[in-house]
Amino acid sequence: MRKSVVAIVGRPNVGKSTIFNRLVGERISIVDDIPGVTRDRVYAQGEWLSQQFNIIDTGGIEIGDEPLLQQMRYQAEIAIDEADVIIFLVNGKEGITAADEEVAKLLFKSNKPIVLGVNKIDNPEMREHIYEFYSLGFGIPYPISGSHGLGLGDLLDEVVSHFPNNGDEEVNEDTIYFSLIGRPNVGKSSLVNTILNEERVIVSEMEGTTREATDTYLHKESQDYVIIDTAGMRKRGKVYESTEKYSVLRALKAIERSDVVLVLIDAETGIREQDKKIAGYAHDAGRAIVIVVNKWDTVESNEKTMKEFEIKVRAGFQFLDYAPIVFLSAKTKKRLHTLIPSIKVASENHAKRIPTNVLNDVIMDALAMNPTPTLKGRRLKVLYATQVAVKPPSFVVFVNDPELMHFSYKRFLENKIRDAFGFVGTPIQIFARKRQ
């Protein structure tokens, strides 16, 4: 189930970044920035009343023709388009300005739930300043103070009350949901279109979760799949692709809903640092992953070329050593037939469950092969292990003291589990716990 998205929108200098920092700070709830995304603090995730949500900070909307102002407006419009709920922030000290009224006109067109926050109401005596903001037409203005953290609880109560109920969506557990992520211009949209044209098995177009792009359903060899639309394939694609931080947001939303994530790499331009960062999002989310090297038709290849490129991929994505690599061309359909089987295998492994007795046989063999390490004269004792979850497969190893479980030994156990059961295409998690 995807997280709802909240955008903070308003003209410049009304305190959007201050409120953003408050909403993703410890004073509100349990909140964590997503690593690698928030260099400019534009995107993070938070939690309120046990509901997790993604939150976007936007550049102030200015009215004008200057290129910078147009770009700021563009980015704000994208954030509005992505959001489930919008916080419209105004400055309580300055009152309503012409720029506020222009922003209000833009928000009225969005048909999204709007929560009006009147910032810089730093003491109770200033509350009388909020009444004029009723004239903006967005209902109750919520007095808040970004600098002091006042009133944010009431504001968030109203925000979460507008979240769509994603839990009502019926999902066939046998259906494999997969998405395509990657930096701009690696061929995500082209590959989706090629998959659909090649298979010619589009049964229907079905709506995804609220305000989500349309998912595409297909059936292949007795298996149902849903391709999750990413990167603005059907809607203002060039705008999204040219604005990196919002294409990242769309990728993260798609990852949340996916069983399998295809990480696309451009064979022509090679591996970039951004490729690794984007792949890291899917890995950290515990999704099954297939690495897809697209545009293989542009590479002058011989019998060694593919192996040499695979070595480069493995070196660049060491944390994805479990992910299969598929070489293909969306343009010419070269090797396209290898993609769907790889997705299916990764999905099956992502949901694989190992019986406890069989798992412990493998663990005991591993202990005999490589005895447990000692730390300060104390030896780690592994008592038994059990699988506690799937998607991704997660194992608990009960030990005498979890502090004695060094990362390297945990990695050794993971490798032995993979040797025994495969788990191609999926990350696995191992947790050390003290037996009660």
Image (cartoon, helix red, strand yellow):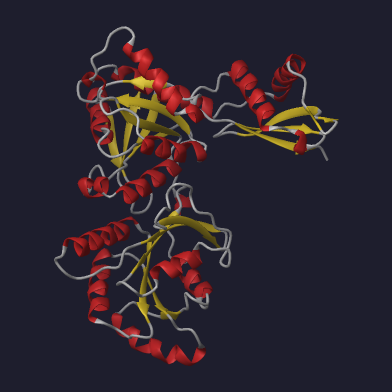
Relative side of 233 to 245, left or right: left
For this orientation, the residue located farthest to the right is 377
The quarter of the rendered structure image containing the C terminus is top right
Task: Report whether residue 221 is seen.
Answer: no
392 left or right, relative to 303: right
Question: Residue furthest toward the front?
Answer: 376
The residue positioned 27% from the left and 27% from the top of the image is 195
Please identify the residue farthest to the top as the structure is shown: 303
19 is higher (above) or lower (below) than 389? below
Q: Position of residue 238 (x, y in %)?
A: 20, 46
Vertical relation: 432 (above or below) 104: above
Going 38% across and 83% down the picture, which residue do you hit? 92
Q: Is residue 346 above or below residue 70?
A: above
- In terms of image quadrants, where is residue 134? bottom left
Q: Nearer the viewer, residue 78 or 355?
A: 78
- As rendered, which of 173 and 411 lies closer to the eye? 411
In percent of width and height, residue 296 lies at 26, 20
Q: Quadrant of residue 372?
A: top right
In the figure, 330 relative to 275: above or below? above
Q: Quadrant of residue 261?
A: top left
Query: x%, y% of residue 416?
Result: 64, 19
Where is residue 157 drawn, in percent x and y?
A: 50, 70
Q: How many numbered circles does the render carry?
A: 0
Q: Is residue 388 visible?
A: yes
